[in-house]
Image (cartoon, coloured by chain):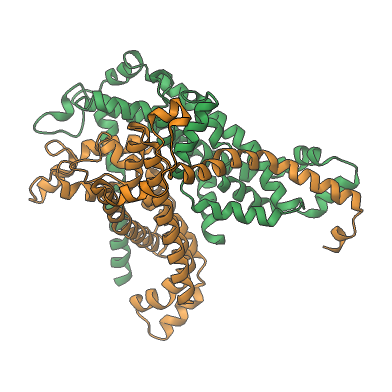
Amino acid sequence: MSARADRVPGRARREGRAGLAFVAPALGLIVVFFVLPVVAGFLLASTDFDIYAIRDLATARFIGLANFAALLHDPVFWKALGNTFYFVLVGGPLSVAVSLGVAMILNARLVRFKGLFRTVYFAPVVTTMVAVATVWRFLYHPRFGVLNQLLGVVGIAPVNWLGDPHWAMPAIILMSVWKNFGYNMIIFVAGLQSIPGTLYEAARVDGAGPMQQLRHITLPSLRPMLVFVSIITMIGYFQLFTEPYVLTGGTGGPLNATLSLVMYMYKQGFRWWNIGFGATVALVLFLIILAGTLLQLRFQRERE
Amino acid sequence: MRKLAVAAALHLALAIGAVATLLPFAWMLSASLMQAGEASKWPPRFLPSQATLANYRALFERLDLGRCFLNSAFVAIVSTAGALFVVSLAGYAFAKLRFPGRSKVYRVLLTAMVIPAQVAMLPMFLLLRTLGLVNTYWGVIIPALAPVFGIFMVRQYALSLPDELIDAARVDGAGEFRIFRTLVFPLLRPILVTFGVFSFIGAWNDFMWPLIVLSDERRYTLPVALANLIGEHAEDIELMMAGSVLTVLPVLLLFLVLQRTYVEGITMGGVKE
């Protein structure tokens, strides 16, 4: 450190200038294509910007919180909000639990072919969501779908997965867990490997069974990672869009049973050009994600 | 004996999971080789009675999906190449060059990652419209050129580069950009490969933003084209499966070849937290 501190001032100035120049392209792009749009999003949400305003900006008016008020009285918004929470609160924990379970099996000392299993489980993560959802759309076909055929083998009557409002969201959750669990699994495997084996040996000497080891060693050691994974998963799951879009042909049906907040924003903003209203939906999504993140961080801090 | 039983049970569970994971892919591939209408015959069959490439031929000849394939490749390659440049410069500067406001700006960038991209989409569309970039490849590419997670990845890696090496080059009178180009960039290679794979796969798979920006069918990327086709060809299961194979194949192959670097990239973010 001291070697750097006593450098000639001219060189420090040059380094500072170079640093600014090197981050300039990134910061410039981020400001123009992220910061400005986000700020503009807040402003748009307080206007009645619509298809006419695209032609002539002067027709857009400032309407304060009127969009929010309209949102609160919009039953479709509440439906989309409920669906999104359904997906996040059921699908998120399920996906994290499956990831953790598979990671623990993969990490067991007795298991062979770890690399092979890891590759197989991870493959859905890198594949294109649209293609995957196209395949699942047919797997879910009530008559010819592979899923109902398998259920038929064990004597379960066919389910109209994507046609029945009660089953459509579970179908989306099932597909999402299949697609995503490999990602968090990789993170958990790395975490499990970093727990010192001596901890488990000491626990065994003290007579702790597998369940006690899980509760008193594995889970506490993984806690910071669990928080990280939960937050990342939650943020991602709140942005549900492609899955229902492809599985339901862009409708969010049946009877809006799979309409998510992002899909509603897309429909309002980009299909019907109610841009001010769409921006309000996006803003609500942001506030919810922010609150969720802060809540989880707070929960983590209280536990410590 | 008990150990053997446990090992057998664990492997059985893993094998069932592997079959469940691979089943959709297997069915996709199998159905893509079936003759038209065969996938929706009763009783259903899992393998084609006689494998045919007719569906793939139809994709290229009738639906011009080869063009969309090239669109996807262009968008993914150009946005990855551009992002590699932007992100390596910024990541290195945030790690190694001292400039006013450095740590503050970096913290703000990381915090901003909680803001969902969807918040920016409507205003960004209006912005691109004013710039004349709607319905162009650049409208998809440019907003993707400075991903914060890429800056984060490069910075984490660049922190481990030895200061002495960089200082020695300065003493030799090399300018900062020359140091970056000839010394730092080659040293960053491993992390840039990792980021490049991430970026390419992400850009190839991206759906929502290309769906919004691209309105001309001839400019569609593969995912957008596929989602569009399913509307008209919902009953042509075999054709849609061939389209899915075509869409998935490049990223799956890339992953299989470079999976070690890809997996390292994921654990980087998770473990260090």
Q: Position of residue A102 (x, y in %)?
A: 36, 59
Q: Quadrant of residue B34?
A: top left
Q: Colour of chain B?
A: green
Q: Position of residue A26 (x, y in %)?
A: 64, 41
Return the residue found at the far bottom. A206
Is residue A121 shown to the viewer in this render?
A: no
Q: Position of residue A278 (x, y in %)?
A: 37, 41
Residue at 55 percent across and 26 percent down: it is: B131
Residue at 21 percent across and 31 percent down: it is: B47
Is residue A165 shown to the viewer in this render?
A: yes
Q: Position of residue B151 (x, y in %)?
A: 62, 47
Return the residue found at the far top. B61
Q: Looking at the rendering, in which quadrant would you find the N terminus of chain A? A: bottom right
Tell which of B133 and A68 is nearer to you.
A68
Residue at 27 percent across and 44 percent down: it is: A259
Residue at 64 percent across and 53 percent down: it is: B106
Tell which of A240 and A233 is nearer to you.
A240
Q: Which chain is orange?
A: A
From the viewer's perspective, tell me whether residue A74 is left or right of residue A12.
left
Counting the numbered discs, the total is 0
From the viewer's perspective, tell me whether residue B172 is left or right of residue A233.
right
Q: Quadrant of residue A203?
A: bottom left
Q: Quadrant of residue A253?
A: top left
Give the answer, above or below, for where A62 lies relative to A198.
above
